[in-house]
Image: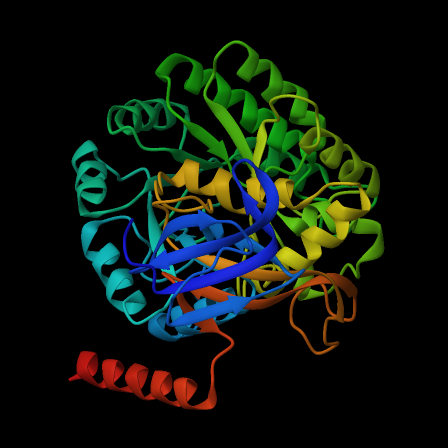
Amino acid sequence: MPQIDTVIRSRRVVTPEGVRAAAVGISSGRIAALLGYDARTDVRHEIDLGPVALLPGCVDLDVAVQSPGQPLRAGYEHTTAAAVRAGVTSIVVTPAPGRPAITGVSALKTHMAAAAATEVNVAFLGGITPRSTPADLADLRGAGVVGFHCSLSDGGAPDISAVDEALLRKTMVEVAAMEAPLLVHAEDAGELAASRRSGHPGGGPAAPRPPRAERRGLERVIAAARVTGTRTHISPFTAAECAALLAAARAIGVAVSAHTCPHYLCLPAETVPADSPAFRCRPPLRSGANRNALWSALLTDGDSAISTIGSGHRPGTGVAAIPWTLPALWTAASRRGRGLADLVRWTATGPAEVAGMRWKGQIAAGYDADLVAFDTDAEQTVPVADIGPYAGRLLTGRVERTWVAGRTVFPRSAREAGARRNSLGAAALHVNT
């Protein structure tokens, strides 16, 4: 066994075998061993969380990091700072609306440089456009993207436009050959255009983006994935009426799964102001009936097609929700009788599997010591001034501490915070010169 340098004890450690009292031994940033809660150790650092739960850090798929007009480096700094406060230790960055859009190796390197000083693990998705060639995708994969992303409608930026039927199938063949996952925004462009032309009797922000656009898009994606065998993950999935379509596809062996977000599970459209920018997401929030049906699809016995849940963070262009992902989801899930094992499966283990992050998402020997202390009983009211969709709401659950590779990244001492600011400033100066 490697020499253990830190031990974290909790009476509720979420392991692959279940929730149990344990002591997690850490060596050189990795989990070296799971010991009995009362095991005697001779280590330099020891933390006893008592009843506060210890979870693997969240892996947040399909995250945008940059607000319009914000420097890219600042976007990474602000988003990842919010992430560690929320127990998110890894983010998988969507190719747009960040600028430049990640459609080639040059843009990917720009994002990698901007993210270099951050303290969370940052992975990237490559964007697919009508101009993408097989060589472009191979180069992106070789340069380090963990998967690819495309949209059947508006892709989030002028240079991430919709892919048509022919390109979708061609791309799926290429992505399958690289053994990479493909994330798809599945709203169908034709259905959205038809909805805008015909109008909607009820009006409101949901009018131009009806659930039938998701259904039509899903039918296209499933048909293509069935032929190509590509691992395909729908992100985000919101129209609960389509859950049976996904289940049927999986039943015949189509490698399709889905990702949703806490705001689709927590916030029915009837309860939010129609004109507030804090709730502008693509697809839009659905009805209370849809929310309940989405929960039913998520909690179905057996193999649920909805395997991952993440913030859907889109600062400046949609829901800015990453700081409240765990508390919001836990508030809703615990009321439905779900436990910490479910929370971890949705936010850590499942996303790590989709992104191919082999050593993330579990508390087990050999895995990275990306960990979160989560007080499931603590209540907190989201500040009214918060720019996200949970402003003013009472949530249950609070992140008390976050570790990345065994090192505390939240909360920080005043000295650590000052050193961090100085290092970021020096890094920026170096890049600019």
Q: How is the image coloured?
A: rainbow
From this viewpoint, which residue is outermost toward the front? 40
Q: In this view of the protein, which residue sits in the foreground, 11 or 293?
A: 11
Where does the image place residue 415, in percent across and percent down from the top left? 41, 90
From this viewpoint, which residue is outermost toward the top? 252
Q: In this view of the protein, which residue sits in the foreground, 401 or 7?
A: 7
* Left or right of 118 on screen, residue 308: right
Q: Residue at x 72, y 35 (%)?
A: 294
Where does the image place residue 287, in percent across and percent down from the top left? 80, 42
> Which image quadrant for residue 426?
bottom left
Where does the image place residue 423, in percent across and percent down from the top left? 29, 84
Where does the image place residue 391, in percent across and percent down from the top left? 73, 69
**Quadrant of the image containing the C terminus:** bottom left
> Which image quadrant for residue 245?
top right
> Which image quadrant for residue 177?
top left
* Left or right of 342 on screen, residue 360: left
Task: Confirm whether residue 68 shows in the render.
Answer: no
Q: Residue at x 71, y 45 (%)?
A: 265
Q: How many marks?
A: 0
Q: Is residue 173 above or below residue 252?
A: below
* Left or right of 184 on screen, residue 198: right
Q: Is residue 101 above or below residue 292?
A: below
Q: Is residue 356 above or below residue 104?
A: above
Task: Confirm whether residue 314 shows in the render.
Answer: yes
* Left or right of 424 on screen, residue 263: right
